[in-house]
Amino acid sequence: MSVHSTSPAFKDNAHRALADVQLQKALGNVRAGFIDKRAAAAARLPEFEALRDAARDIKNHTLAHLDLYLEAYEKNVTAAGGHVHFARTAEEACALVIDICNAQGARTVTKGKSMVSEEIGLNAAIEAAGMKAIETDLGEYIIQLRGEAPSHIIAPAVHLTKEQVAQDFRRIHADLPPERDLTKPEALLGEARAVLRERFLESDVGITGANFLIAETGTSVIVTNEGNGDLTQILPPVHIVIASIEKLVPTLEDAAQIMRVLARSATGQDMTVYSTFSTGPRRAGDVDGPRDYHVVLVDNGRSAMLGTEFEDMLRCIRCGACMNHCPVYHAVGGHAYGWVYPGPMGAVLTPSLIGVDKGGHLPNASTFCGRCESVCPVRIPLPKLMRHWREREFERHLAPATLRYGLGFWAYFARRPALYRLATSVAMPILGFFGRTKGRFASLPFVSGWTKGRDLPAPQGKTFQSQWRARGGRTR
């Protein structure tokens, strides 16, 4: 599936995704591989809900004093021998990275998984500057071979089956013997590892993202399950950390607190296999590590979110739990969202970063079931934030005319309770009668956008309001 650069193509993307047999097969892994594991991991930790509250409070405190923590972080990175660079835009961030690479005379750059590097288009900028960028995370490496964007923020290639990956390896890896068996995941992993080991050794610059930046020590933290992040930052002579400004936390203890909910929410693990803390370049007496250490802090629209109703989104720790539990994501996958961040978190963050005129379709790609908010480790009220974007889209007349007129028609009745009760008391029994055989509608006038992709349940019995009145306006 080709990925559109912005989200207005969401509906077309979604239609293609629903008809893609291979994609639908692969998306079954999201349902099976994440939801039950998260629930089991949370159940094993009695204080899990209290930790969610603590993680929310830590992030809120940091955002309220972000300027002070940015200054403290810069001071401590510099004291450790590193360099901090501030980038207001994606273009500035790419230019800073290119300048650092050019100063090293770099020809090959290895990269760990980083969503902010996807956001700013860093790989394309590196290639345009005459260097080669190589993704070292297995999922990122696979989609780089395919020329695709990630479809999930923690499992970039979750939209693919192992058969598709095997075909790509046979197509790209010239030294792969045709008789080698690649039917098992372990064989695919071994093939990728053999190729990537050579890339690590020849790399001139290593680039990683950061799950956390710790203000009190000037430390960057990455959590991974593959160890490629460690090789990316230890073997090359230069290590560049690229991270957005909201990744800051005040102390080591704060980072440890949030890490207790991060892995459990993301993959159902108590902790990821590797949790790597890096502070500055190699010191005298160190046996390995980079000679130079740089941090590029990216704003790219985030400071404009501070102090607004969308500030809560800056608490996000990129665990992916919201999309793992989202029925819409389960149906269409990440590429349908058309930009870097999919699922409920993308439906809020994307309009914040590229504008509601380009990302306004995404907040409408939600059933508002509330599962995303119920599992968010930092308690971001995602449905409320999506409603805010819907309101802005409506106010600016960006929503389709049919939607605006439809809402106006509904509002006419909603502002007149007696008329509303009369209309629903007539319509519900009629719909119930015609849907009585199957209990649902496979097609229905005026709501074909819904029924093309799913069934619409037929009304059963009386309306809620009539039942409420029959009970005297009381619950049982």
Image: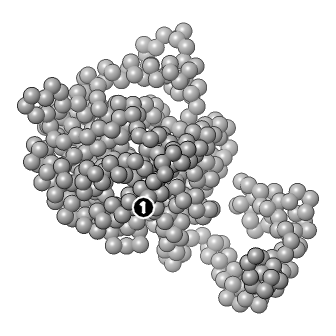
Residue 398, image x and y in percent?
53, 71
- Hey, which residue is sitting farthest left in the picture? 284
- To which residue does mark 1 refer? 53
Residue 366 appears in the figure: yes
Residue 80, image x and y in percent?
11, 44
In the image, residue 476 sits, relative to residue 103, either above or below, namely below
Label 1 Cα neighbours within 10 Å, binned few <14 / some 14-19 / many ≥20 = few
Relative side of 116 to 420, left or right: left
Residue 42, image x and y in percent?
51, 48
Residue 1 appears in the figure: no
Exactly how many numbered labels are in the figure?
A: 1
Relative side of 420 to 407, left or right: right
Secondary structure beneath label 1: helix
> What is the quadrant of the C terminus in the image?
bottom right
In the image, residue 476 sits, relative to residue 51, either above or below, namely below
The residue lying at 71 percent from left, 90 percent from top is 416
**Residue 378 image-quadrant placement:** bottom left
Name which residue type carries label 1.
Answer: Asp
The residue lying at 18 percent from left, 49 percent from top is 217
Relative side of 205 to 313, left or right: left
Relative side of 423 to 152, left or right: right
Closest to the observer: 36 or 427?
A: 36
> What is the quadrant of the N terminus in the image?
top right
Residue 164, image x and y in percent?
57, 28
In the image, residue 334 sits, relative to residue 346, either above or below, namely above
The residue lying at 69 percent from left, 80 percent from top is 410
